[in-house]
Image (cartoon, rainbow, N blue to C red):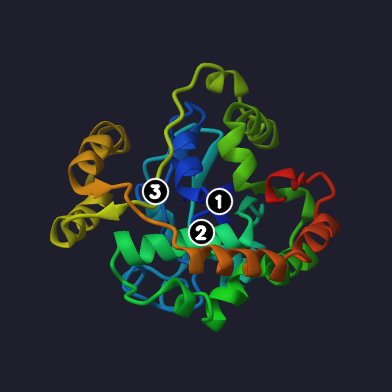
């Protein structure tokens, strides 16, 4: 039975998709067929209704990794595990608990980017940013410390690595080198790697076409996705998302609201550099 020895999680719109696809191309890794299995989510939803830790055992979960052979790293990347009590409770009970990488983003930008995705791309939200930014769940989930504290209190700290989204995007090669050291795999693979930003928040033109693409994506091999994604987004998306004055003020207020996070997160990992959060 194959189980992951790495889990990638983090806040929405913080780079988990990019990191998943980049790591999946390394010859020493095996990625789950679907990026997010949602197996250890706290609730059953449409994404895990057929495979979840509430109704199914670990053998069912292992099917996501059935194709793994001799790769050093087997992994999946369900972002929401950062918030999941089930993930913490179950992963720590593995014979050898997997390493965890959590990606974090400056909260005001994370909230706004998630709003853009929900409003313009997935079309699940039809409200102003002002209304969206007042939702309790949105504010609560941007306070990463309260969730990470739980992980650091109960999970082997040496197996947790925090990565800032801003570092990942601005210093891709250096951050991937660091991650490879953490995973004990050859970092030279990323020396001349063609990094491509995945899951960018863009404006979708045709909702019907996008819904269809979302349904068939899990069945398309990673290599094929990499080839056709730029073509699809060029045909069915637009970067024309305007930032209005009221949104700018809300972003400033949110940034001030979460300014305390830097010191709290530093208490968990003193190596974090928040220069891009200023």
Mark linked to residue 270: none
At 74% from the left and 61% from the top, the residue drawn is 155
Alpha carbons under labels 1 and 2: distance apart: 7 Å
Q: Where in the figure is residue 30, as x and y percent of width and height?
A: 45, 38
Picture residue at 36% right of the left edge, 69% below the top: 48
Sequence-first disc among 1 and 2: 1
Q: Is residue 104 left or right of residue 190?
A: right
Q: Residue at x 52, y 29 (%)?
A: 28
Cβ–Cβ under 8 Å for marks 2 and 3:
no
Badge 3 or badge 1: first in the primary sequence: 1
Residue 164 x, y percent position in the rendering: 65, 47
In the image, farthest residue toward the front: 245
Residue 231 visible in rendering: yes
In this rendering, the count of numbered labels is 3
Q: Is residue 211 above or below residue 126?
A: above
Number of residues whose C-alpha sits closer than 10 Å to that of mark 2, classed few (under 14), some (14–19) or many (20 or more): many
The residue that mark 3 highlights is 199
- In depth, the one of 78 and 70 nearer the eye is 78
Residue that carries the numbered disc 2 in the rendered image: 79
123 and 84: which is toward the camera:
123
- Contact (Cβ within 8 Å) of mark 1 with mark 2: yes
**Residue 31, quarter of the rendered image:** top left
**Label 1 secondary element:** strand
1 up-or-down from 58: above or below: above
Q: Is residue 56 left or right of residue 7?
A: left
SS at mark 2 in the image: helix
| Crowding near the residue tagged with mark 3, few <14, some 14–19, many ≥20 C-alpha atoms within 10 Å | some
Mark 1 — residue? Answer: 8
């Amino acid at each position: 039975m194959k189980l992951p020895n790495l889990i990638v999680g983090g806040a929405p719109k913080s780079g988990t998709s990019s990191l998943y696809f980049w790591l999946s191309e390394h010859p020493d890794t095996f990625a789950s067929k679907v990026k997010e299995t949602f197996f250890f989510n706290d609730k059953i939803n449409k994404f895990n209704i057929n495979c979840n830790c509430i109704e199914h055992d670990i053998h069912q979960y292992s099917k996501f990794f059935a194709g793994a052979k001799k790769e050093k790293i087997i992994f999946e990347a369900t972002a929401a595990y950062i918030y999941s009590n089930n993930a913490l409770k179950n992963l720590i009970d593995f014979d050898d608990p997997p390493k965890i990488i959590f990606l974090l983003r400056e909260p005001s930008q994370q909230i706004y980017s998630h709003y853009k995705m929900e409003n313009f791309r997935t079309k699940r939200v039809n409200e102003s940013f002002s209304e969206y930014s007042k939702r309790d769940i949105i504010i609560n989930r941007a306070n990463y410390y309260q969730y990470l504290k739980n992980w650091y209190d109960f999970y082997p700290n040496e197996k947790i690595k925090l990565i800032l989204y801003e570092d990942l995007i601005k210093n891709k090669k250096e951050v991937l080198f660091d991650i490879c050291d953490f995973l004990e795999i050859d970092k030279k693979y990323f020396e001349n790697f063609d990094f491509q930003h995945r899951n960018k928040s863009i404006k979708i033109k045709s909702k019907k076409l996008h819904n269809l693409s979302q349904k068939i994506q899990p069945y398309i091999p990673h290599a094929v996705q990499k080839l056709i994604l730029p073509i699809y987004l060029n045909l069915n998306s637009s970067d024309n998302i305007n930032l209005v004055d009221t949104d700018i003020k809300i972003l400033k207020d949110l940034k001030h609201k979460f300014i305390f996070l830097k010191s709290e997160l530093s208490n968990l990992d003193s190596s974090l550099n928040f220069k891009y959060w200023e």
